[in-house]
Image (tube, rainbow, N blue to C red):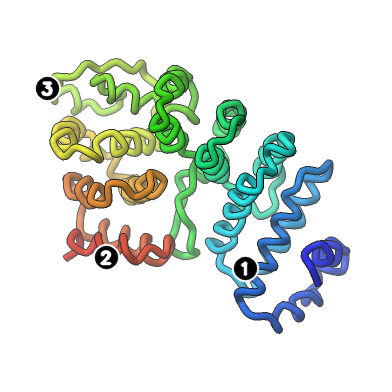
């Protein structure tokens, strides 16, 4: 039974009973065969058509059943879903049908079924693939997707999702990260493009605005922490007060790490400036998420430089071994990254 036939069976009303017939068939296949089968199914569902609501709903139901029956973990389903987004770009499906960009937006953001699959980080995956392929429409699509993400981030749902993670059930911290994608464009000599997005005002582009502020040596620190007034600044505070919430704080840390990761001297200077902020109650209450955000940002930046992750963590005063132990557990058990987990040993020993 191929993927098309599978879909026809799956969308039949009887398919969602206690024991759909196709699951019995799948049990006779190897795990690799089932994985390939599932990815082909995702690919078929993602093709642009006028029934994206139905496609999203059916894929959500099927994926949930795969997880409930222990065939795949949630993280594996998300990984395979994002892998098919990359395949779409590599197959030049975008070039053949630009409408698929609009379709992807609707596919990810519409509906409520299996929201755990359809995160805004899928747009990061899409844009990274476009930049990697040097697609002629990359910039146009990027602007379009940023507008779509900005609209979604105005809802409390996506802000809440971006701040939630857990080891049990295995769930990664997922959010839209535009800055790593733009830095790849900048490496290709397009500095103006980074500058253009740094002037935009919105939660989807705030990482870029902060990074540009660091680059201009104008620290973008909000005045939510009174203790900061006691710190002697030799750098101008330039960014107007933005919406100060936990998501904003994650963006501050993410963009700061991105800026200082190549230069230990710059790291030392900036960490001193932010030391009291990191010790504040506002940061302490979300520090487990902050540590994970740094790791996920490092991954999105291509894990470069390799040493920057531990270098940055080691300068964060006030972080206990328990926090780093929980981080190591997340990296090993949720992200499945044994190499990075090993690197973190020195922080918990």
Judging by the rendered image, the residue that carries numbered circle 2 is: 342
Q: Give the mark nearer the N terminus: 3 vs 2.
A: 3
Q: Return the x and y of residue 117 as percentages of the image width and height.
A: 61, 54
In the rendered image, the quadrant that contains the C terminus is bottom left
Within 10 Å of disc 3 (Cα), the crowding (few <14, some 14-19, many 20+) is few
Mark 3 against mark 2, which lies toward the viewer?
A: 2
Res 120 visible: no
Q: Give the mark nearer the N terminus: 3 vs 1.
A: 1
C-alpha separation, residue under disc 3 versus residue under disc 1 = 53 Å
Disc 2 secondary structure class: helix
Residue 226 is tagged as none
C-alpha separation, residue under disc 1 versus residue under disc 2 = 29 Å
Q: Return the x and y of residue 100 as percentages of the image width and height.
A: 71, 39
> Residue at position x 13%, y 25% from top?
231
Mark 3 against mark 1, which lies toward the viewer?
A: 1
Taking depth in this image into account, of 107 and 282 the one nearest to the observer is 107
Disc 1 secondary structure class: helix
Res 235 visible: yes
Residue 67 is tagged as 1
Q: Return the x and y of residue 130 as percentages of the image width and height.
A: 56, 39
Q: Is residue 31 above or below residue 81?
A: below
Within 10 Å of disc 2 (Cα), the crowding (few <14, some 14-19, many 20+) is few
Residue 309 falls left or right of residue 48: left
> Residue at position x 42%, y 38% from top?
180
In the rendered image, the quadrant that contains the N terminus is bottom right
Q: Is residue 249 above or below residue 236?
A: below
Disc 3 secondary structure class: loop
Judging by the rendered image, the residue that carries numbered circle 3 is: 232
> Residue at position x 60%, y 26% from top?
140
């Amino acid at each position: 039974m191929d993927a098309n036939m599978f879909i026809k069976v799956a969308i039949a009303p009887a398919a969602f009973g206690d024991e759909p017939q196709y699951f019995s068939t799948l049990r006779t296949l190897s795990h690799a065969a089932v994985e390939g089968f599932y990815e082909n199914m995702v690919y078929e569902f993602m093709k642009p058509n006028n029934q994206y609501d139905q496609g999203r709903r059916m894929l959500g139901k099927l994926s949930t059943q795969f997880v409930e029956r222990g065939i795949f973990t949630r993280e594996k389903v998300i990984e395979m879903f994002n892998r098919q987004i990359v395949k779409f770009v590599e197959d030049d499906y975008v070039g053949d049908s630009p409408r698929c960009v609009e379709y992807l937006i609707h596919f990810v953001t519409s509906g409520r079924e299996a929201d755990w699959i359809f995160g805004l980080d899928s747009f990061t995956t899409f844009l990274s693939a476009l930049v990697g392929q040097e697609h002629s429409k990359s910039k146009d699509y990027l602007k379009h997707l940023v507008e779509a993400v900005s609209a979604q981030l105005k809802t409390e749902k996506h802000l809440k999702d971006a701040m939630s993670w857990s080891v049990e059930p295995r769930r990664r911290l997922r959010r839209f990260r535009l800055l790593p994608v733009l830095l790849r464009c900048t490496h290709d000599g397009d500095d103006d493009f980074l500058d253009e997005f740094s002037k935009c005002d919105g939660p989807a582009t705030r990482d870029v605005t902060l990074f540009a502020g660091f680059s201009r040596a104008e620290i973008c620190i909000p005045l939510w922490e009174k203790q900061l007034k006691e710190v002697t600044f030799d750098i101008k505070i330039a960014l107007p007060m933005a919406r100060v919430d936990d998501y904003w704080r994650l963006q501050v840390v993410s963009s700061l790490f991105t800026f200082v990761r190549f230069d230990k001297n710059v790291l030392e200077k900036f960490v001193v400036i932010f030391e009291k902020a990191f010790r504040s109650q506002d940061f302490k209450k979300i520090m487990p998420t902050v540590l994970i955000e740094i790791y996920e940002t490092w991954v999105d930046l291509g894990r470069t430089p390799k040493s920057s992750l531990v270098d940055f963590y080691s300068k964060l005063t006030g972080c206990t071994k328990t926090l780093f132990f929980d981080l190591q557990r997340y990296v090993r058990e949720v992200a499945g990254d044994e190499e990075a987990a090993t690197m973190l040993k020195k922080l918990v020993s």
